[in-house]
Image (cartoon, coloured by chain):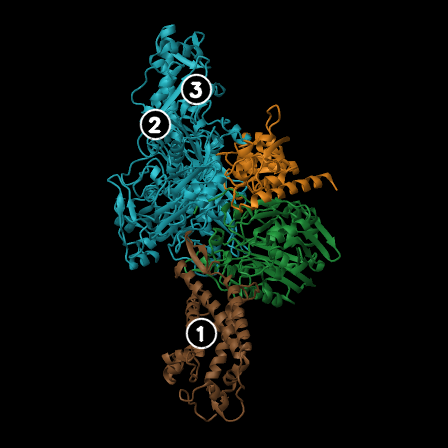
Chain colours: A green, B cyan, C brown, D orange
Amino acid sequence: MASFDVMPDIQLYQPVELDDALSLAERYGDGGWVLGGGQDTYGWLKDRAKNPQAMIDLSGIDSLRGIRTTDDGIEIGATTTLREIIRDERINRDFSLLAQAAGRVASPQIRNVGTLGGNLSQDTRCWYYRRGLACYRAGGNLCYADGPESMNREHAVLGASRCVAVSPSDTATAMVALEAMMVVASASGVRSIAAEDFFVGPATHITQMTALEPGEILTAVRIPSKWAGQRFYFEKVADRDVWDFALVSIAVAMRLEGDSIAESRFVCGGVACTPHRLKNVESAARGNSLSEASADAIAPLASAGAIPLNYNHFKLPLMENLVRRAMRG
Amino acid sequence: MNDYKLVGKDFTPPDVMGKVTGKAKYAEDFRVDGMVFARMYTSPMAHGKVTHIDASAAEAMDGVIGILTADDVPAVEAPNGAILTNSPAFIGDPILAVAAVDEKTAEDALAAIKITIEPLPFVTDPLDSLIAGGPDAREEGNVYARSREGSGFRTVKWTKEQIDDFRAGKEPTGEFAAEWKYGDLDKGFADAKVIIEENFVTTGYAHMSMEPRTAMAYWQNGTCYVHGSAQSHTFWMPGLARLLGIETKDLVLISENTGGGFGSKIGAYPIAALPGYFSKKIGRPVQLRVTGEQEYYMGSARVGFQGWIRMGFAENGKATATDVFIIEDIGANATGGDASSAGGAISLVYDPDAMRFRGLPVLTNTTPRGAQRGPGQNQIAAVMAPIMDKAARELGLDPLAVRKINAANNATTVYEEQRGVTSAYLEEALTMGAEMFDWENRRQQPKKNGSKVRGLGIGQGYHSAGATGFDGLIRITPDGKLHIHTGVGNLGTYSFASTSRAAAEVLKCDWENCEIHNGHSEKNLPWNSYQAGSVSTFAHTRTNYVAAMDALRKMKLIAADTMGGEPDDYDIDGQRVFLTENAAQGMSYGAIAARAIQLGGEYSGQTYPDDINEITQRSVQNLAGSGLVGVAKDNLPQEGTIPGLACAFVEIELDLETGKYEILDYVGIAECGTVLFPAGLAQQMKGGAVWGMGMAALERHVYDPQYGLPANVGYHQCGIPTYLDVPSVTRTGAVDIADPQNPFGARGIGEPAMGCSVAALTSAISDALDGHIFGRTPVSPDMIVNHVTGRDQSFLPLQTNNF
Amino acid sequence: MEFATYRNDVWGREVIRGVSWDLLWLVVVAALVAIALHAVYEAMRKRGERPSSSGERVKRHDSIDRAYHWIMAISMFALLVTGVLPIIGIEFAWLELHWIAGIALTVVVVFHIIRSVFFKSGSEMWISGKDLKEPIDNVKPGKYSVAQKGLHLVVTVLTLLVIASGIVMFLQIDTPWWQRTNALSEAMLGVVFFVHGITTLALIGVISLHIYFALRPEKLFYTRSMIKGWISRDELAANHDPQRWTPDESS
Amino acid sequence: MNPQLSRRRFIKAVIASSVAAASSTGFHSALAQDRPRGAVERLISLNINGQTRRVDVAPQEMLAHTLRYKLSLTGTKISCNRGECGTCTVLIDGITNYSCSTLTHSVRSRAVQTVEGLQAADGTLHPVQQAFIDELSPQCGFCTPGQVMSAVALLNENPTPTREEARQAMSGNLCRCGAYDHYLNGVMRASGQSS
């Protein structure tokens, strides 16, 4: 195995119109690699771990960029950079949860070019998979991360099925919490998918992280005004405080009536192959106030159903602790 | 205080300008006509034998110039690392290289090469190899002991019971390879009021210098020109020449700047010779840019420890006895030797009345190990700090008091031989640090605040910090300029410049009037020490001192010869030599230099002392007749260990719910004799602090034991500390008491600067967790969360190279 | 066309990954063609009156055997659906359904083996020399025609193979009873995947033929007998040699 | 239609036209070898440090590669070549980018600034460079050009950042020597605030 780090020959397209991009995506299908900022692209290609025929660079398509107000909330173009999101006044006012999450992504330089669409559709960080091994996720017939001696501290405690990789995206948790809709276009039309269904697990799609099929392009994300200006909580626990992926993260949106929780969405990152909704926490939280007492009462529900691997049972108490912190006044 | 003009004063080293403008050239910034680019194929297998290489497809490609295999380079005897090998012993062991017109073509060629490797048993954790029936990392054995008496392979196995007892914290009873002791151990423990017994792990981790070990080479009428990434300069020459199979006179090494070394580039490493062989084979200049991943593989790593220690303390906290047993993970190339150094560090820093060290170096199929900033001393510093705290707690003493009563001082004796030290003032350092840190007051502050708890820690670091016997070479030219030739490498400590100022100090030269020649063998450099082991400051203030004294002697002789009187009637200042009684009567340095050229002989380097190294001799020969030459070998008296010492005080705020902690304050105090270059010292103390923070919290090897795969081959996975993982401000100070055995009283500091930091942090973490001792570095958030919530850790006791 | 697909193992060596699923289309097409040809041939062939199903009945299949046949058929069908649909792009959480059905199939097959070996004259399904002569000097068969015996033999072999490889694969995943071990060498794992895949393809072919024959008008009475258990005297006389098979009257 | 768009339309067209040449030989084929060197569709103009440079750029080429291997601007360093270290940081339209992870073709008609472009014509150093010298910020210096560029971008946008703001803004640049403290001192000094 050679260690590569130079981009191999690969065709590049830089369309400036979405329809051009869509026809290219359709034409190349599996062989086409759609990219925005490219920050989760070049490593794969340099390693020659993935070998698409062509890169379809969306960053030149103006219609995919920018934050627009819709009749029900906002629409964020897929190639809007994280930098733009972090600095957007409206998002900071109404959906600070997203701004916070985006602010914890990777490093400043990566946020400067990394796009929302890219961050949402990025591939898992399982180090075995990233090494280019032909595991289930890479179309193989085994999982290296789930052996009796596998080093899987960062891997899944929930929703694993053969593959035990986790979703690395910080903004994905926020999107699920905010009940965002993903707008997906293809040559044959446009469909929109609830964020919760956009992220898919190995039980159904072992080689994909999202519901995007070859030929499809995520064009925008719509965030309904439902949660605008509500109470949010975001926290990401990682080894390093910048430039790292979550061991466990949590994104919470709550609507309070008086001082009791009328409705809430608790979503954990880094624990499953998709952003993981803590539905039992949500239902238990309903009617509770934010207090030490309710925090202690509800936190233990967070890790229900979790099945730890060799090195990651710490994620259970960590999930509970993050819920506890979100439930505090 | 001294009245030096340059020593102890800040200045702008000549290479800083190039660094901030991007003009500073590192190995891979050089381009020469006809240069081609090489890429390496490294072993995908932790241990195996290459049985077949099919490079036909690659060779047929356009733009591919050539292929270099193990058959083209000298074979090396196991366990030593080879330039290229057919018997890879770790993932990433270089097997072949391809040269092409550009890097992409070279990689296309690599992708087309088919290599068949027959797998052999491998192991990634020393204890897995040590246990009966466990695999050996090498066919020759699983232990390789290096010693003066002779080095060799052995196969050492412990019974399962012995391994289990060791894991359980009991004294190891298995076979060991090295032992030394002093004093009466039994009496020592008998005298002890409390005895602390702990086992410990310090996981090895990669150096990951910012500049991968790129090298470029070409041949010109028999001389090999190598642009390398060298931590030391002239010290590299003999090793690199040996690797290339040539004499040092036929080697030109260019290494003006080096993007970090930290011990991984001390001497010439095998891969630095690859372009030389490749260039010879294909007749074109070859540049090998090592990828980041390959830098992880062959950039070497810190030796890991799995050990056990028993330590006795008297009622007043004095260490009465220490018994330590260390298994060291020496990787596949049997490099390291950290364990005995760790024992030596204990004997110096805590100076127990009696001590025994036992060690066993075990081979694993992991990346080659090498000296890494405080090799041995810093691992044990991390282990010792919480033990000192525990002793203090059990004796009801202030942890600071326990450290002070054991602190190294001028009476301290070291190692088996119990030799003395040149000087040591660790207690003064502790006092100074405690004041700056406001230790007393901070201890009174409340500890807990919600889920957050504060922890205070004290750490001590040590490394022997000096070497002797190297050469100094300076020159004064008729234009009156002082030329200081130095073979000190430039790895970013600025020691090549700060030690050069010693010569200017002796000759009372304005710094503006001095020129440093370094980084290129054709600049006629003297034989100098390695830039490691914190030795440069001590060693090269001495070499430049003796060279300057030689020049001074010659100048006075010339003055007396020209102006009459005795040499001793003359004095110097303002770059003039003049009569002490009548300053008006004298000669400028320029005039003296011109005269020296006329006189010839030793004055201008036609003759020179015969005890200087051949490299220095050649340089003097080249310089002969160009001015007044001062050249000498450092034969100044030196006895005893030369300690570089440091201590650190840290306050952390640890969040019990996330396992993360923030470093609220850090104070590091250097005890390195006279401060030579204050800004440079601050840099070393702060950089060392960051390294300690990385070792304490983040950095470790992770290997999948089933497949032998490394998990962390990049900066992100290696957990290199970032701006946000270390405090925004780190405070430093220095004791600044002159050492009697250096003409300027200076000693080195680079390594202790890190040891005190990692120790202070393990101490602070233990303090925050009510004295819990993890006995392991790094301590990661998952470990803390598991401990706080009363869960088992995921790893076996003493397991290493794991998360 | 490739029969197998390949991948690199953990150390970059090429190992077999499994069967090439392109073969699936080949198998489907081949089966349809065979069916079509046979249908045309049968259509052109002259044949006399079809025996009446009315009148006296004789027993052909015990209820327990019928139950066995249909349970096996259902689990086999479930296995094919859960195993093949995801491969042709219809994605759903198939894995647990698949191994649960696999367990069902394994249980009934084991039951059937035990029953036919120890409690029935296993011989009734053995293919003897006589059987082989049936087509040539067209003698009427005993209880089962050589074709039926042949089909049974093929299905038996394929089923045993698919079960055996399936069990090995089952051991390679996490289940409520054990955790995966990755103990099997990657090369061997690929072979197991290949066997499972290729036998699956063969079963698809054979079963589609079986279903086709079961639905042929002149053979429909066999299907009825597999549901209701009986055939009529007429049918018996028309299709079987009473010398070689004398079913017990009572039904 | 605005001129920029039409120009990009044109460039897209020519890039697309190169597919014919490439696709026939499969995606591992070497475009560079398939077509005559300097083939027109690869010869593009880059605005580097205020100068227009014509350069032959492969479709998949990374900016760091173009700078170092084609334009001899070796001040921009390559270390991890993965966007994990920051030594290759350059400014594109004033914003910090990892040039090892930026397609050269995506910076056509955008202003690229590298460490070589900071010094004034008369050789005067950029305040950040001067401050880094005065504070002895670099150690080995390999990460320094990247640190300089991040600091320059910060001060362009926020001339008087707090130390914490500086720390956040610089956090995409690793320094293995651990000179962070001195770099921050340098940023504060360059911003005219005592460090």
Kindly state the secondary structure of the residue where label 3 is placed.
strand
Whether residue D87 is visible to the viewer of this picture, yes or no, is: no
Query: Where is B718 relative to B543, above or below?
Result: below
Locate the C terminus of chain A and report the quarter of the image it occupies: bottom right
With respect to residue B534, does C77 lie above or below? Answer: below
Q: Which residue is mark 3?
A: B483
Which of the 4 image quadrants contains residue A327?
bottom right
Of helix, strand and loop, which one carries label 2?
A: helix
**In-image side of B349 versus B8 (left or right):** left
Image: B284 above or below B128: above
How far from the left and from the top, in percent, is residue B257?
46, 31
Front disc: 1 or 2: 1
Q: Which residue is mark 1?
A: C155
The chain containing the residue under callout 3 comes to B
The residue where tag 2 is placed is B248
What is the chain letter for disc 1? C
